[in-house]
Amino acid sequence: MIADQADAQLLALWKSMVHCPEGSALGFDRVYRWEKLPLTTEPNAFLVEMVRDLKPGRALDVAMGQGRNPICLAKIGWDVTGFDASSEGLAIAQKGAGQAGVELTMANQGWADFGFWK
């Protein structure tokens, strides 16, 4: 029953993200402030596999969250820009990048505000 309630809450959060980017930022800020949040620092396995044989270049991480994927890319030589609406997620990403000894270009913006066309 608890899993069903969690699924329902996540679905409601997802729906609010689509219709209200500001609500998305507030929701994710709240999630990232949760002290017991089991964040993984491991990058997405699919991403790792896809870049394995690529020459490092430039990458854009849309909705980068806590930064586990862009940090992984930066560690292997990629020039990474990422953005996210959650300032809490970006703070975690900045701390992680510092601990990993890499630099990320980050913007605290939602997808509707990011300058894709610049």
Image (tube, helix red, strand yellow):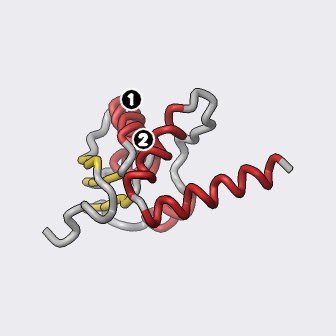
Q: Which residue is mark 2?
A: 89
For mark 1, does the 10 Å Cα neighbourhood hold few (<14), some (14 to 19), or many (20 or more) residues?
few
| In the image, farthest residue toward the bottom | 117
Disc 2 element? helix
Residue at 50% over, 38% down = 30
Quadrant of the rendered image containing residue 67? top left
Query: Whole-percent x and y of residue 6?
Result: 72, 50
Rendered view: 99 above or below 9: above
Q: Which residue is mark 1?
A: 99
- Taking the image as shown, residue 102 lies to the left or right of residue 6, namely left
The residue lying toward the viewer, choosing from 37 and 31, is 31
Q: Is residue 21 above or below residue 96?
A: below
Answer left or right for 37 relative to 93.
Answer: right
Q: Residue at x 36, y 50 (%)?
A: 85
Q: Residue at x 25, y 54 (%)?
A: 79
Cα–Cα span, label 2 and label 1: 15 Å
Q: Position of residue 16 (x, y in %)?
A: 50, 59
Q: Residues within 10 Å of mark 2 (few under 14, many from 20)?
A: many
Q: Three-letter amino acid code at disc 2?
A: Gly
Say if 43 sits above or below 115 in the image. Answer: above
Q: Residue at x 39, y 45 (%)?
A: 86
Q: Are marks 2 and 1 in contact (CB under 8 Å)?
A: no
Choose the circle earlier in sequence order: 2 or 1: 2
Task: Look at the image and tell me in which quarter the C terminus lies.
Answer: bottom left
SS assignment at label 1: helix
- For the image, the number of numbered tags is 2
- In this view, the residue in front, 20 or 64, is 20
